[in-house]
């Protein structure tokens, strides 16, 4: 857990403290963005944009203990923008001319990892985001609902249906 004193110092404009916040959250935010967007470059962009916005707005953070949720909320908005860009691009570009959005993996993944990644890719972006926040990041549905500004029931039902879809795909 990140020390609240570091977050407090970052809120007061201490760059070294914000650098510690960055070091602490960057890997988690990158994994979340990568699972959500399925593209290394866009994930890196989303994380960079998240930290830029966080740096500009950290003084407005009310509770130092809620920084993780705050950062993920910012990241979620960035990922939604990238997804909207994907959709706009698909509407204006011939599907046959589009390049594959997923970058080749940098390490040799095992078969289970490939299957899970392919299964996640079958979900709609909003479903994938909810699954990642729940299954990968460990957030409860109430926390996800708050981060994504959705009703709790919507998040719960989407998570249930999405996990059911994934189970069917992975079992076949």
Image (cartoon, rainbow, N blue to C red):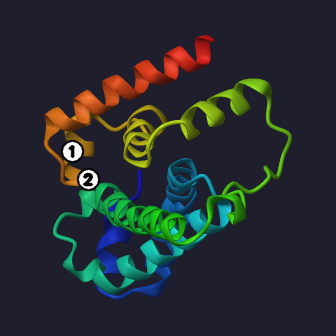
- Residue drawn at point x = 53 percent, y = 75 percent: 48
Callout 1: SS: helix
Among all residues in the image, which is located at the extreme right?
A: 108
User: Which image quadrant for residue 26?
Assistant: bottom right
SS class, disc 2:
helix
Which residue lies at the image location 57% right of the left edge and 20% below the top edge?
169
Measured as percent of width and height from the top left, residue 15 is found at: 46, 86
Asked if residue 62 is positioned above or below residue 151 in the image, the reply reads: below
| Observer-nearest of 54 and 10 | 54
Q: For the C terminus, which image quadrant? A: top right
**On the rendered structure, is 101 left or right of 57?**
right
Q: Residue at coordinates 64% horizontally, 35% vertically from top-left?
A: 118
- Within 10 Å of the Cα at label 1, are there few (<14), some (14-19), or many (20+) other Cα atoms? some
Query: Which label is found at residue 148?
Result: 2
Q: Which mark is residue 5?
A: none
Q: Which residue is mark 1?
A: 145
Q: Are marks 2 and 1 in contact (CB under 8 Å)?
A: yes
């Amino acid at each position: 857990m990140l020390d609240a004193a570091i977050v407090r110092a970052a809120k007061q404009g201490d760059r070294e403290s914000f650098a510690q916040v960055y070091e602490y959250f960057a890997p988690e935010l990158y994994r979340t963005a990568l699972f959500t967007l399925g593209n290394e470059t866009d994930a890196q962009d989303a994380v960079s944009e998240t930290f830029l916005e966080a740096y500009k707005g950290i003084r407005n953070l009310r509770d130092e203990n809620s920084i993780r949720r705050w950062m993920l909320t910012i990241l979620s908005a960035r990922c939604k923008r990238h997804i909207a860009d994907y959709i706009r691009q698909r509407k204006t570009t011939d599907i046959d001319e589009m390049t594959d959005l997923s970058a080749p993996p940098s390490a040799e993944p095992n078969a289970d990892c490939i299957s899970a990644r392919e299964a996640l890719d079958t979900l709609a972006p909003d479903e994938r985001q909810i699954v990642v926040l729940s299954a990968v990041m460990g957030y409860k549905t109430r926390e996800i609902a708050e981060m994504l500004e959705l009703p709790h029931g919507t998040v719960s039902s989407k998570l249930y249906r999405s996990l059911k879809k994934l189970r069917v795909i992975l079992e076949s």
